[in-house]
């Protein structure tokens, strides 16, 4: 079993690690047009990087995008192929949830690729509405409300 570490950082610090992962997963593997991958939410967002402790390589990334009134998007979740199913994605989600709680974000939303819906359901997200195409890939909106701290 692999051991991982996760950190949350600004886009300025995360960019050099997140860009190659997102390019590999979204642009190269999933054929997302490059102009759709990079948007105005990278700079103000908070980025999670997951490191494989053994190789000291960044193997996963995601973005936390607060939008005001307690609404926060989880997006750009990407795990490099050799590390999928190894726990890196689980740590990515746990870190996103912890960071959302820390920032008092209560209403969480993500646009899940329908083939990965089951993964997000494991973290308490529920699908809403009908599937739709986003960047040529079938997605479904999923939401979760975080309880306020005790």
Image (spheres, rainbow, N blue to C red):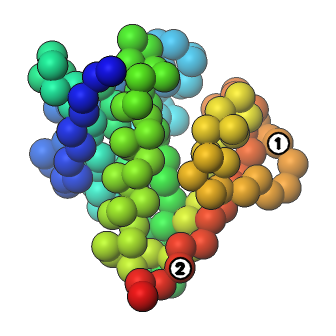
Residue 73 appearing in the image? yes
Residue 104: % across, % down: 39, 79
Q: Which mark is residue 71?
A: none
Q: What secondary structure is found at the residue carrying circle 1? A: strand
Q: At 29% across and 57% down in the image, what residue appears? A: 46
Q: Which quarter of the rendered picture does the N terminus lie within?
A: top left
Q: At 49% across and 53% down in the image, what residue appears? A: 74
Residue 83: % across, % down: 38, 18
Q: At 51% across and 59% down in the image, what residue appears? A: 73
Q: Residue 115 appears in which quarter of the rendering? A: top right
Residue 115 lies left or right of residue 53; in this view the side is right
Q: Residue 97 appears in which quarter of the rendering? A: bottom left
Residue 59 lies left or right of residue 16; in this view the side is right
The mark nearer the N terminus, 2 or 1, is: 1
Which residue is most to the front? 1
- In this rendering, the answer to whether 98 lies above or below 35 is below
Mark 2 neighbour class, 10 Å CA radius: few under 14, some 14 to 19, many 20 or more: few
Residue 81: % across, % down: 43, 14
Q: Which residue is mark 2?
A: 147
Give the distance between the C-alpha atoms of the residues marked 2 and 1, in whole angstroms: 27 Å
Q: Which residue is mark 1?
A: 131
Instruction: Work out whether residue 12 or residue 2 is closer to the camera in this orientation and state it.
Output: 2
Instruction: Work out whether residue 48 or residue 15 is closer to the camera in this orientation and state it.
Output: 48
Pair 2/1: label in front: 2
- In this rendering, the answer to whether 93 lies above or below 56 is below
Residue 106 lies left or right of residue 59; in this view the side is right
- In this rendering, the answer to whether 81 lies above or below 3 is above
């Amino acid at each position: 079993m692999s051991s991982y570490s996760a950190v949350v950082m600004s886009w300025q610090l995360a960019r050099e690690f997140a860009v190659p992962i997102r390019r590999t997963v979204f642009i190269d593997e999933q054929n997302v047009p490059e102009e759709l991958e990079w948007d105005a939410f990278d700079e103000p967002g908070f980025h999670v990087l997951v490191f494989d402790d053994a190789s000291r390589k960044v193997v996963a990334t995601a973005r936390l995008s607060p939008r005001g009134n307690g609404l926060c998007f989880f997006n750009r979740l990407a795990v490099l192929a050799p590390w999928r199913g190894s726990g890196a994605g689980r740590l990515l989600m746990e870190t996103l949830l912890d960071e959302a709680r820390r920032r008092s974000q209560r209403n969480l939303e993500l646009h899940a690729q329908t083939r990965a819906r089951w993964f997000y359901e494991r973290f308490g997200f529920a699908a809403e509405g009908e599937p739709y195409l986003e960047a040529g890939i079938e997605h479904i909106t999923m939401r979760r409300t975080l309880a306020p701290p005790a």
